[in-house]
Image: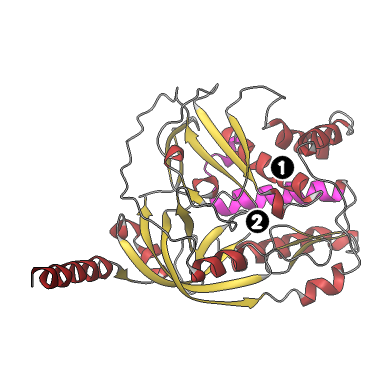
Amino acid sequence: MKRALTFVFVLGFSCCLYAQAVDTTVCDILNNPQSFNGKIVRIKGTVAAGFDQFVVKGADCGINVNKNIWLSYPEGIKAKAGPAAMVQVQPAHNFAGDVPAVQRTPVTLDKNNKDFKLFDSQLATPYKKGGMCLGCNKFEVTATLVGRLDAVEKAGMQRDKAGKIIGFGGFGHMNAYAARLVLQEVSDVTSKEIDYSKTLAVTKDDTAPGTGGSDQFTAARNFVKAFAPGVAAGVQLKRAVDAFGKEKENNGVVIGFGAANTAATKDEGKGTVDSPDGLLFTCTFNTSRLEGDAEGRAIIFIGENIADLRNPAPEDAGAGFYDLENHAWQITILDAFATRQKTLTLPGGYLILNSAWPQADLDKNVGDALDGFLVNEELLHR
């Protein structure tokens, strides 16, 4: 009799734990992330693993914020999906300001669960046809997600009047997301192939040559040296490459390779090493999704992110995420154009460079395509 009572008690307790998940929506969370901070939530959403995104989208929210929740797996989960490239900012060991300790309740995820394996595999499948398509995935994935919701009052960097970074907040690429979902369970996984047919008509005869590898940083430095002193394009590209520092120089930029898809404890709070200005910039490149010269394009993009965050021009010190992304893509397009790349496509089939465009239309075509990508695909608020 005692065993039966114990079994009933344990079963009832387990049901109560599962019931603690709050059923909500992406839009409700984005409207007030702080009200869900630390809670286990259950949402239905579309997930994107793009160039610098690993997010749950809220396309129909209609609110003036970036309409995404950053997605992470629990620490220790070795899985494949994630952004192709990203940078996170962290206070170094010698950062002068206060950095509050963060305590989070651990969550677990069964990486051998068939729904999770399908979910992760579909999000890690790249689109490979037609020239260079940076961070382009083959599938769009929709699922029911359960996990711990982490939130901050304000994402991004907080600066003083002089533009110096004095505070940190946020998750994901450039710390730009006010909410993060650390995945505990996934179900109801469905996927559909993303339509790249319009782009393919233009890019089908293009190739994306190059060998990739660790010497892409050296190649980028050497390419910049080919510009005559004072040439505007060379100056802009040099700024992006110089953000990584000289070889073996400790300038606070840490480079790693992999999927960058977990909520690691070491990334919150102060780092363990010093830097010249008390800031650490952790850059991660997923080389399995950056074949050939695509890695070089990613280096320029992330380098420009670092330069804009670390040493912004006075007029750019308060730039929002949309503007930072826009600027980095412009410099990346400049790099592609300077190396005589024929086309460059972004997730969702946005053609942002086509060497066949008339010179008179180039600026407008690039601007329109880039704005469409940032607003409609990345769901960023201007």
Residue in front for this viewpoint, 219 or 1: 1
Query: For residue 352: magenta?
Result: no
Could you tell me residue 163's position as x and y percent?
50, 33
Q: Residue at x 71, y 76 (%)?
A: 195
Q: Is residue 275 above or below residue 114?
A: above
Q: CA distance from mark 1 to mark 2?
A: 12 Å
- Residue labelled with disc 1: 299
- Sequence-wise, the earlier of marks 1 and 2 is 2
Q: Residue at x 54, y 39 (%)?
A: 317
Q: Which amino acid type is shown beneath numbered disc 1?
A: Ile
Q: In terms of secondary structure, where does tag 1 sit?
A: helix
Q: Residue at x 46, y 27 (%)?
A: 272
Q: Residue at x 57, y 28 (%)?
A: 252
Q: Which amino acid type is shown beneath numbered disc 2?
A: Phe
Q: Quadrant of the C terminus?
A: bottom right
Q: Is residue 15 above or below residue 92?
A: below
Q: Which residues are magenta?
A: 312-337
Query: On the rendered structure, is 294 left or right of 286?
Result: right
Q: Which mark is residue 102?
A: none
- Local crowd size for mark 1, using a 10 Å CA cut-off: few (<14), some (14–19), many (≥20): many
Query: For residue 315: magenta?
Result: yes
Q: Which mark is residue 51?
A: 2
Q: Report the number of numbered marks.
A: 2
Q: Is residue 382 visible?
A: no
Q: In terms of secondary structure, where does tag 2 sit?
A: loop
Could you tell me residue 379's position as x and y percent?
56, 64
